[in-house]
Image (cartoon, rainbow, N blue to C red):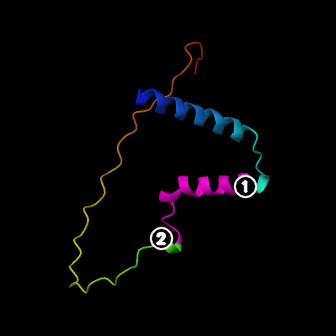
Amino acid sequence: MKIWVISFILLFGFAEFFQWASHVTLPLPVFILAGALLAIASNADKRSGLPFRAQPTSPAPNLPAEPATPLPPPAPPRRSISFLIRNPEETD
């Protein structure tokens, strides 16, 4: 019986809130502010380039310089496998 009473009260409360909310009109600046806040919240993880999100940089430790290993010479370019498709009616 308690469940029925609680369900009825909640359903009645939602219905009354919906009727009240349907008559409320908000000014345009409220919608603009809400849209800006929604845009900021949805892009919160993409703000890594901004200065206040930048991680402090620590100086690189002094490591002994290693000799650079020479790179192998580049491989010669391969022959292209593309070809020209000709019209059979075309004669050269």
- Residue in front for this viewpoint, 80 or 58: 58
Q: Which residues are drawn in magenta? A: 31-50
Q: Residue at x 53, y 70 (%)?
A: 50
Residue 8's spot in the image, x, y percent? 52, 29
- Residue in front for this viewpoint, 4 or 62: 4
Residue 22's spot in the image, x, y percent? 72, 37
| Numbered disc 1: secondary structure | helix
Residue furthest front as drawn:
1
Give the image quarter of residue 33.
bottom right
Residue 17's spot in the image, x, y percent? 64, 39
For the C terminus, give its image quadrant: top right
Q: CA distance from mark 1 to mark 2?
A: 28 Å
Residue 14's spot in the image, x, y percent? 59, 35
For the N terminus, give its image quadrant: top left
Confirm whether the magenta stretch covers residue 64.
Answer: no
Q: Residue at x 65, y 36 (%)?
A: 16
Q: Residue at x 70, y 40 (%)?
A: 20
Give the image quarter of residue 57.
bottom left
87 on left or right of 6: right
Name the dominant secondary structure of the magenta segment: helix
Of labels 1 and 2, the one closer to you: 1
| Numbered disc 2: secondary structure | helix
78 on left or right of 47: left
Residue 81: assigned label: none
- Residue in front for this viewpoint, 74 or 29: 29
Confirm whether the magenta stretch covers residue 39.
Answer: yes
Q: Which residue is mark 2?
A: 53
Vertical position of residue 55 compared to residue 31: above or below: below
Q: Which residue is mark 1?
A: 30
Residue furthest top as drawn:
89
Mark 2 closeness class: few <14, some 14–19, many ≥20 residues within 10 Å: few
